[in-house]
Amino acid sequence: MIITTTDYIPGYEVSEILGIARGSTARARNVGKDILASFRNLVGGEVVEYTKLIGEAREQALDRMIEEAKRLGADAVIGVRFGTTQIMQGVAEILAYGTAVKLRKKE
């Protein structure tokens, strides 16, 4: 499965648009990680605990988007974007979405 942020793939043309493929996850902070993050906030620098949490959430949302695209019968997802929103205090949703398409090799 080809995943790209562009609206085209060199050497291919879109033969069919199957619809929007999306995947999301909602993640909550962890009290233990919050304590470590508080200490890092005092001294400055990257808050590694949250970087890892968001990275894992982003990958899970992307994996879920790919699974939806496969269910649609897609060869690729183009125009992929990520979004995030705070659902409630300490809980964020990560959304991955793009256009599921069928491809044909250019001649």
Image: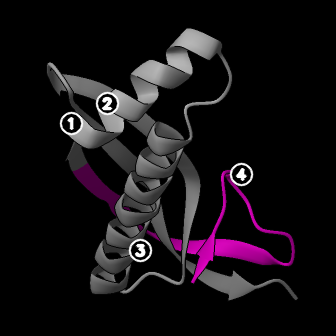
Residue underneath mark 3: 66
What's the residue type where badge 3 is placed? Ile
CA–CA distance in space, label 3 to label 1: 31 Å
Query: Toward the viewer: 78 or 35?
Result: 35
Residue drawn at 31 percent across, 30 percent down: 34
Q: Which of marks 3 and 2 is in front?
A: 2
The local secondary structure at tag 4 comes to: loop
What's the residue type where badge 1 is placed? Val
Query: Toward the viewer: 105 or 69?
Result: 69
| Residue range corresponding to the magenta coloring | 1-25
Residue underneath mark 1: 31
Q: Are marks 2 and 1 in contact (CB under 8 Å)?
A: yes
Type of secondary structure dominating the magenta stretch: strand
Query: Is 61 left or right of 5, judged from the image as shown?
Result: left
Among numbered discs 3 and 2, the one appearing first in the sequence: 2
Q: Position of residue 18 (x, y in %)?
A: 37, 69
Residue underneath mark 2: 34
Where is the N terminus found, in terms of image quarters? bottom right
Query: Toward the viewer: 65 or 21?
Result: 65
Among numbered discs 3 and 1, the one appearing first in the sequence: 1
Q: Does the magenta stretch include residue 43?
A: no
What's the residue type where badge 2 is placed? Asp
Residue underneath mark 4: 6
